[in-house]
Image: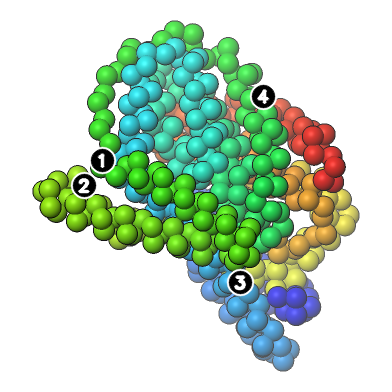
Amino acid sequence: MAEAAMLNLTTSGFGLAALAIFIIAYVLVILEETTHMRKSKPVLLAAGLIWALIGMAYTSKGQGPAAELAAQHTIFEYGELFLFLLVAITYVNTLEERRVFDGLRAWLTARGLSYRALFWITGILAFFLSAVLDNLTTALIMGAVVLAIGREAPRFVAIACVSLVVAANAGGAFSPFGDITTLMVWQKGKLSFFEFFVLFVPSLVNWLVPAALMHFAVPADAPARVAERVTLKPGAVGVIVLFALTIATAVSFRNFLGLQPALGMMLGLGYLQIFAYVLQRRGARRGNDDMVLNSFSLIAKVEWDTLLFFFGIIFAVGGLGVLGYLALASHWLYDVLGATPANIAIGVLSAIVDNIPLMFAVLTMDPAMSDGQWLLVTLTAGVGGSLLSIGSAAGVALMGQAQGRYTFMSHLRWSWAVAAGYAVSIAVHMVLNRGLF
């Protein structure tokens, strides 16, 4: 990658054409709700065209092998991310199929708690669930709970959904597994597994500040108690245990064996496959269809639009790096502005631009930063998307799920509170973890 980056093509026809292609593709991603074109489609096309331009540009300069080397490096980075996410999403699909999340929803709706109590409980659960699951899945699970509880209280739904988005994004920021951006930073080796957890307090503050400011706007009465009986399918507890063991395996591969965490996750997929085989054999003997677990069908249900979107973004942004644009951006951000203002600005920008290409761009720029600064950009990229409802996958998904009860404008009314949490969380990190700067 370093050899390929030596060519500065930012002012060439190849470079300008690639930049225009990327901008058009990303505008189409932003307009997904309007055009109804899946976000993976424009970025896949853009990635292919950008790399075709790179191939032509480098070959014309006699640097074809350097472009090939850069492509191989990008393929390796995407392959690690792909395998890791494939396993994680399969486990989430399996937990859903075994009705684990339905059981959680039914348990909460049957408690007869007040709206304010439920506001805090759903926020706390979203915060901690997001540290293990991704923010999108967490938001959808807890969003189903909020919508079930708030059928007769649209005001509660609107405010609770803002809290869920902030909590899900904040909870993912302190865990290597909690967000794609933290996973990328960990797999790149910028921070060790346990270093992320020093962001626990700043991340918690990021949610607590807006939640406290929203508390008195939540209705004080209680919803009608809803009785719903949900029985977990056989093997549900076993899948939970295996998921925890898979995460431990991935961490062990990185920390003790010096191998990629994705290899540990694939071993964990092996655990699930054998467990599914055992359940199927037992189900066949007992004539119990609920016991049957088809792990291959759950792999097939993986969200391919998301995985292909990651491919397109990583290759498109990586291509811009090969053409010299990321080196230019790195100079203006980190050499001119300085690391702290740059990292804070990246978080604000993630409210408009997806945090995945932003973080991949930072990792590709690879500015010389202390661990404290890498933690800062991990925090800001993770929680900055909460500033607007369109700033994260959690917010966009909840807007679709809530069907008009949680909207861009209902979130915008509380953006000032979310911004307060954003500012306080940065201050807390810089004070608590000042020894890492």
Q: Which residue is mark 2?
A: 291
Label drawn at residue 25: none
Pointers 1 and 2 in contact (CB under 8 A)? yes
- Give the residue drawn at x 42%, y 26%: 146
Say what amino acid the circle numbered 4 marks. Answer: Val
**SS type, badge 4:** helix
Determine the residue positioned at 51% across, 51% down: 247
Mark 3: which secondary structure?
Answer: helix
Residue farthest to the front, as pictured = 256
Q: Amino acid at mark 2?
A: Met
> Does dot 2 land on a helix, a strand or a loop?
helix
Distance of mark 1 from mark 2, alpha carbons? Answer: 7 Å
* Residue drawn at the location 21% of the way across and 47% of the way down: 291
Give the labeled residue for mark 4. Answer: 209
Toward the bottom, the furthest residue is 62
Residue placed farthest to the left in the image?
287
Dot 1 or dot 4: first in sequence order is 4
Picture coordinates of residue 36 (x, y %)? 41, 51
Residue at 55% over, 33% down: 127
Of pointers 2 and 3, the one earlier in the residue sequence = 3
